[in-house]
Amino acid sequence: MDAHSLLLMAGMVICFGIATFVLAERIGIPSIVLLLLVGVLVGPEVFGLVDPSALGVGLRVLIPLFVAIIVFEGGLVLDINDLRRLSYPLQMLMSVGALVTWGSATLVAHFVAGLSWPLATLFGALMSVTGPTVITPLMRRSNAKERLKVLLQAEGVLVDAVGAILAVVVLDVLLTSGTTISGAFDWAERLLLGSLIGLVGGIGLAYALRFIGSKLNAETTRLSALGGAIAIFIIAEAISHEAGIAAAAVSGIVVGNIDFPHEEEVVLFKGDLTMLAITIIFILLAARLKFADLAALGWWGVLAVVLMIVVVRPLCVFASTLGSTLTWRERAFIAAVCPRGVVAASVATFASISLEEAGFAGGNLLIGLVFMTVIGTVVLQSFTTPLFARLLGVEPMTTLVIGANDLGQLFARQLHSQHHDVVVIDTDQQLIDRVRQHGISTITGDATDLQVLRKAGVERAKAVVALTPSDKLNLLVSQVVRSHFKVVTIVARADNESTSSVLRDLGIMVLNPLQASIDALTQLVQGPSAMSMLLSHQADQSIYEVEVSNPRVVGKPLKQLNLPSNVLIVAIRRAGNLFVPDGQTELQAADQLTLIGTASTIQQADQQLREGASEAMYHA
């Protein structure tokens, strides 16, 4: 294929990819589903518009770079505090989970799909990864608890490095007839080297961006971030082959947790690049798929995919989460989410090419089973994940914030930072994009529209807070919610006293930012110690409300509770009455306790007070 034909093909891949992504967003399904379909249609098997083999060695150059950008961007949005909070199950999923998946998937591939032991072992290694680019839209659709979202997204980013390096090491052992012991040392060496390079490089890049951002503009900072991410990947690859993906993941996490100027613009820019990279990768890889490879597996291949979903993943999750604070419902939901995505598909493609070049028979069966698993898990779970979230009761009570203006953004980010489920609604797409880059769920639309409110989850909302600059709009939204939905708490911003009066008459709580500031300043003067604690933005000075539902503490006086020492119970609401307790006060079921303490100690107290609970309910 000449240069002009390659140019036309590249342009078609980009145009088809972007159009497919837009269509997927419009109809509300994960984009990977349509990208795979379009890739097959434009490939040699159907219309023949795109032939990835014409790229030759270029395919092996482009795909790893794109994967590095995707993994780096995935790490950017992970909060290190969330990872610490979920360190035990996350570490177990990356270690025990990966080994269980590798072993069980190998057995399925050999005894069910009919792959030889070497190819089955390689397939098992490839299946130890999940799909972070698929999990994010799935979580957006399912609206599961925040900590489940974080755990699944972190697993997707971090286990990609573990699984991808494992698959490459297994491939090297197969092609070079190496030993298992040498392969294990090789895997550990690449993973540790990549992680170390990512850590050092991430710190260096973050502080470089801090300096560049303070001296130059946002555009230069964005380009510097991209160049730095690629440089870290290339350095790791130069030192140890396939260590780059671990370096990309770790450096992304490091950079994402160090503040620097224009950080929001960098995250948005990387998100756009990631979407472009995903569209290109999946169309190119799907275009290589041959129907004969799928047909050769037959119904045994379909059965293998089903077993991957209903046996292998549950084994992985339940073995990894033994002894964790996750409830059985939460563990069951995690077990129901196991999509494979870009890393599995790309590494499998390169593995099949390497096997073919080495004269290793059966590479077509490997790539066929991998793509069958990718397609099966993504298509099926795009529909079942929201259903399982509802059936298992892992959908949290949501706070709807109407208005993505400065006040709405700050309020949503504060709740989100304390691990509460928040959905922000606004008609301004630019404001919505700013909110979304913080990992907060958003809906673009008119909050007075019943369908928009339902889509945002108003029917499971514990509170709706209207914070737009328009008193009229806040009043209208509050009236709509009050009239059509059973929401416990409705709060509306009102700068005008006449609007405030109307809202109070409707039984709606009113927030006047100016008056609230004056009241806070007055209290600060009168009671500086107490008020300064309440006004602080530090995570260890927060107010929470927890409902007592654990029968083991009902009937016990407060002084007998083994609560953390720095958790203070300041009030109890019982049967509509609010009172200040003392050490002799005995708890009753359904008591609403108002606590002050740190996020971690509040969580410990919550687990003692609420049966099966994992996170405190926030009450501001």
Image (cartoon, rainbow, N blue to C red):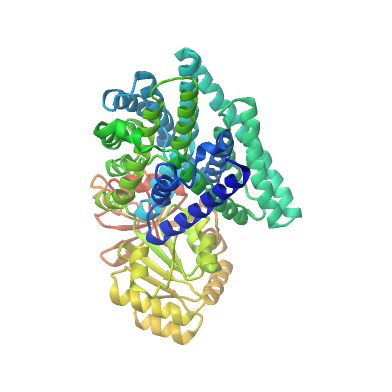
Residue found at x 46% / y 49%: 599
Q: Is residue 430 left or right of residue 114?
A: right
Q: Residue 38: give x, y in percent of width and height.
A: 42, 49
Q: Residue 274: give x, y in percent of width and height.
A: 54, 48
Q: Is residue 386 left or right of residue 54?
A: left
Residue 22 vs residue 618, the one in the foreground = 22
Q: Residue 317: give x, y in percent of width and height.
A: 33, 35
Q: Does the rendering let one see residue 136?
A: yes
Instruction: Indicate the quadrant containing the N terminus: top left, top right, bottom left or bottom right.
Output: top right
Residue 153 vs residue 421, the one in the foreground = 153
Q: Is residue 406 left or right of residue 93?
A: right
- Report which quarter residue 400 is drawn in: bottom left
Is 199 placed above or below 442 here? above
- Report which quarter residue 364 is drawn in: top left
Instruction: Indicate the quadrant containing the C terminus: top left, top right, bottom left or bottom right.
Output: bottom left
Is 556 placed above or below 319 here? below
**How many numbered marks, from 0 up?**
0
Is 324 placed above or below 439 here? above
Residue found at x 34% / y 81%: 506
Q: Residue furthest right?
A: 215
Q: Residue furthest front?
A: 2
Q: Does the rendering let one see residue 256?
A: no
Is 274 placed above or below 428 here? above
Residue found at x 44% / y 35%: 344
Residue 93 vs residue 85, the one in the foreground = 93
Q: Residue 592: give x, y in percent of width and height.
A: 32, 59
